Every structure is written in C-alpha cells, then in structure tokens.
Image (cartoon, grey):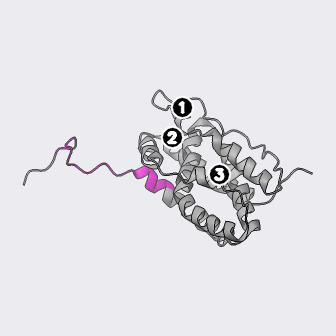
C-alpha cells in the first residue's frame, strides 16, 4: 500500500507537540489548581474566589504584546470583554477588587500564558452548569463572565494551530509563560479588594 503524502487531504494533521509539552510541564500546577478550586461552585465564597483567580489571569493577558516575529499576530486572542465582565460580576457580588499590578509578560511568554486562559474556556462550560445550579440557591448570582467565557466556538483549535508555529526559544518561553499563568491564578484566588 502506498503511503499518503504529508500534504494529502487524507493525511492526519501533525501532532501539536507544543500543546503536549505545555500540558506536561504544567500538569502538577493544573492538578493543584483543580484541588484548590474543588467544590468552588458549591457556595458564593468559592465562586468569588474562582472569579478573583480568573481576574488575575485576565489582567495579566489584557493586552497583546508586540509581535515577536512576523507570523505572530496575537491580538486576535485578546478579549477585553472578559475583564469588564469579571469586574462587573465581582461588583455585583459586593467586591471592588484591586488591580493586581502584574508586570507585563515578555511577548515570547504571552502565548504560553494565554494557553492557560484559552484552555480554561473548555472547563468553563462545566463550571457554568455548576454556577447555574448555585444560582438556584443564590438568586441573582452574576454569571456574565462564565456565560461569555464558556460560549461555544472554534477558538481552542485555532489557538492550538497558532501555538504550533512557535519554534526554538519561543517554545521554552511559552512553557515559562504557562507556568507563570498558573501561579498568577493560584495567587489571585486570595481575595484582594479595595477598602
């Protein structure tokens, strides 16, 4: 049997090795964060902690860095509505969170950190269902961010395609960025609000 050419429409797509590398490199942090958020949507306090953690991550990624190379048009991955919706949900919960004041990420780390945010949208679909159940017990619970973050679409596969073009040192920087992003979320779970 003749082997299919790599450009054949019937050939399997190339394995996204950077995605696997990021997943492996952050597996422990991901497990720790999942454990810290276990049952987070069982009550209002846990839900608030989740929103605070996500706010820290969204603030970290609020603006796309200047392109690292000619192929990297990353502004597509910036969604300013996320931050506005998070802040509104937190205000509706009675909080006025302080800005986290995080230093901007170097452009070479930005896509790795964004891997954490874009990947969290997949889990947000499950969290939204849990939050909707919580809202039955807590009428008026604000869900605008989760509803927006969990919306269906093709962002994740397109994002993985963009990740795959990173080469050389940018791949190592992406791993550093993803690790940093998990740390930012974990730190953001601690309530920080203005007086």
Q: Distance between the residues labelled 3 and 1?
A: 30 Å
Residues marked 2 and 1 touching at CB (< 8 Å): yes
Q: In which quarter of the image is the N terminus?
A: bottom left
Residue 59 in sight:
no
| Magenta-colored segment: predominant secondary structure | loop
Mark 2–mark 1 Cα distance, whole angstroms, equals 9 Å
Instruction: Check disc 3 and report its element: helix, strand or loop.
Output: helix
Q: Nearer the viewer, residue 110 or 77?
A: 77
According to the image, label 1 marks what residue?
68
Q: Report crowding for label 1: few under 14, some 14 to 19, many 20 or more residues within 10 A (C-alpha).
A: some
- Residue identified by numbered label 2: 170
Task: Examine the rendered structure and indicate whether residue 84 appears above or below residue 137.
Answer: above
Q: Is residue 115 left or right of residue 45?
A: left
Where does the image place residue 156, in percent across and percent down from the top left? 46, 49
Q: In this view, does 60 lie above or below 69?
A: below
Rendering coords of residue 35 (x, y %): 64, 71
Q: Do we see residue 165 in this rendering?
A: yes
Image height of 102 relative to 19, above or below: above
Indicate the quadrant where residue 75 lies: top right
């Amino acid at each position: 049997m003749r082997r299919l050419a790599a450009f054949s429409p019937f050939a399997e797509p190339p394995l996204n090795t950077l995605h696997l590398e990021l997943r492996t490199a952050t597996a422990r942090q991901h497990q720790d964060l999942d454990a810290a958020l276990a049952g987070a949507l069982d009550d209002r306090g846990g839900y608030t902690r989740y929103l605070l953690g996500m706010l820290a991550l969204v603030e970290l990624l609020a603006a796309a860095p200047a392109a690292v190379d000619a192929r990297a048009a990353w502004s597509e991955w910036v969604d300013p509505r996320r931050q506005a919706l998070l802040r509104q949900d937190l205000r509706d919960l009675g909080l006025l969170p302080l800005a986290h004041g995080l230093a901007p990420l170097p452009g070479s780390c930005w896509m790795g950190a964004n891997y954490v945010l874009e990947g969290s949208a997949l889990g947000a679909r499950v969290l939204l269902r849990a939050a909707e159940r919580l809202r039955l017990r807590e009428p008026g619970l604000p869900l605008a961010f989760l509803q927006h973050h969990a919306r269906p679409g093709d962002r994740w596969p397109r994002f993985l395609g963009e990740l795959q073009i990173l080469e050389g040192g940018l791949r190592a920087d992406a791993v550093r960025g993803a690790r940093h992003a998990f740390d930012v979320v974990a730190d953001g779970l601690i309530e920080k609000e203005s007086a």
